[in-house]
Image (spheres, helix red, strand yellow):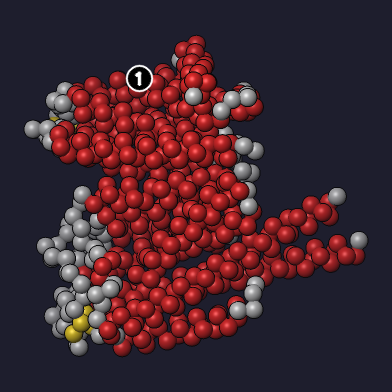
Amino acid sequence: MNDFLRVAWIVMRKDLTVEMRSREILYTTVFFAVSCVLVFAFALVREGQPMEDAAAGILWIAIAFSGTLALGRTFERERHTETLRALMLAPSDRPAIYVGKLLGMLALMAVVEIVLVPLVGLLFHAPFQASPFWLVVLILAGTLGFASVGTIFAAMLVRARSRDVLLPVLLYPITIPVIIAGVRGTTALLQSTPDEPMARFWAALLVFFDVVFVTLSLWTFEPLMTE
Amino acid sequence: MSKAFTPVAFIVLALFALAPAVVAWAPFEQTMGLVQKIFYYHVPSAMLMFISAFVCGIASAVYLFKRSAAADRLALAAGELVVLFGLIVMVTGPLWGRKAWGVWWQWDAKLTSALLLWMIFIAYLMVRRFGGPGSEKLGGAMAVFGMANVPFVYVSSMYWRTLHPAPTVVPTLQPGMRGAFYFCVTAFVGLYVLLLTVRRRIGEHEAEVERLHLALED
Amino acid sequence: MKSRVSILIVMLVVFGAMTLSAQQPGSSTPPDGFVPVNAAPQVDQLPAAPMVIAAYAFVWVALVVYVWFLWRRLAKVERELADLNRRIQTR
């Protein structure tokens, strides 16, 4: 077990070190997320008044879109240098590699979200500060759910043709429950009096989704990644 | 194909030829009237869509862990049939809903989960077709993850208003309706088994053709 | 194969158009189970027959097209197989 966590930690640190040297994915993803929100602002803000209840949806769409971009870029780098194959040849637990990649992905998406949440709050007059605890729980659980499925599909797509198109094609239908739960939960928090029991229900659903899909990913990563 | 194929094919053909008459003879429904008759084709298709999704998901799991090519062919055949029966469900459903509810579409739990399941399997077919080498595994993962996804979609869209009749309507059917309904279910299940068999047969032949091509090259 | 993809696309477009033209839900309450009566009610605001006929026609067309597609594909692959077998034997 100790070994497992050590491998996961090393893989994550490796990803983050590579990223910190160029900051390519970080910068491009944050910029993409910001422009995504701006596009929505131009489309949905009329005469200074944003559309009602739009903030939650826009936040989650921006998370999903920028997450897809980051996933694609992260694994494109691995493919370019053939390092994923090298990783898979290492005498270590394969699921540990998955966990490491997932943690790296989560760290990256967390940084993007730290920029996104205030921006959406500002542009769409959304009171995100009303109940910060449940907001953080929803976003963390939602991001984990999205990234857990995304990491395994992006890892598999490294070998496939037309991987850029196939990643969103595969990922979005599977992660629809995350988007539904994230949007509904966040909307409940943005009411004039935050509806916390509702947010708790959606957060619970997200946690349940995380448990099922992380387990499923750990279970299938080995057979999926062996050639 | 087994010896049973031809007789079964004739029986299914006869059932399908008789189905319109049986449906026409079934009693009308009180509030929905004539349009409720879509039920006799809509529900069996929906049942087969979900069953086929599970066949595909389980066969894919078997393929991933046991590396059985036969399981993979079964999964592909079942995946294609999910999309076929899903298409029937997605076209007959709105036609019924337009008349019975006044809307073509409703974000109800059953409708949403059926649509999502259908989309997942369209994505599955796209991966199998455009994924290139290694797409069997990718598709397998898609089927397994997609199968696990259905309950989540169902629960999350439950919080919308539900218009769709519950599946419990089936055991409470009146005798005249029940006979016609099970007649149609039998016809559809028979057809499903036939199509699955033929589609698997095609897969087997294609694998054999590939093997022979390689043998010729040597 | 291409024809199948194009059929799928046409269906998607039709279906998408239907979904887009959806209106707000009516105020009708959901029925609890089906109650049979002997004649079709006369007071139907929307004609039901075209819906039923369209639905049934669609089911038949979809099934026939798929069977036809399977049949063609099976014939093609069986021809290929026979051809390959012959070539292997004459070698």
**Residue A183: x, y in percent?**
25, 38
**Split into 4 quadrants, where in the image is the C terminus of chain C?**
bottom right
Which residue is labeled 1 in the image? A111
Front-lying residue, B102 or B140? B140
> From this viewpoint, is residue B125 visible?
no
Q: Position of residue B101 (x, y in %)?
A: 19, 66
Chain on which label 1 sits: A
Query: Compared with residue B150, is residue A140 higher up or lower down, i.e. above or below?
Result: above
Type of the residue with mark 1: Val
Left or right: residue A184 versus residue A92 is: left
- Relative vertical location of residue A56 with respect to residue C83 in this rendering, above or below: above
Q: Secondary structure at mark 1?
A: helix
The part of the image, by quadrant, that contains residue A105 is top left
Instruction: Please say if C35 is above or below A83.
Output: below
Q: Percent from the top left, x then y, of residue B129?
A: 57, 51
Tell me the residue at 39%/81% (across/down): B183
Query: Who's the residue at 31% across and 88% down the image?
Result: B25
Q: Residue furthest right?
A: C91
Q: Residue at x 60, y 71 (%)?
A: C71
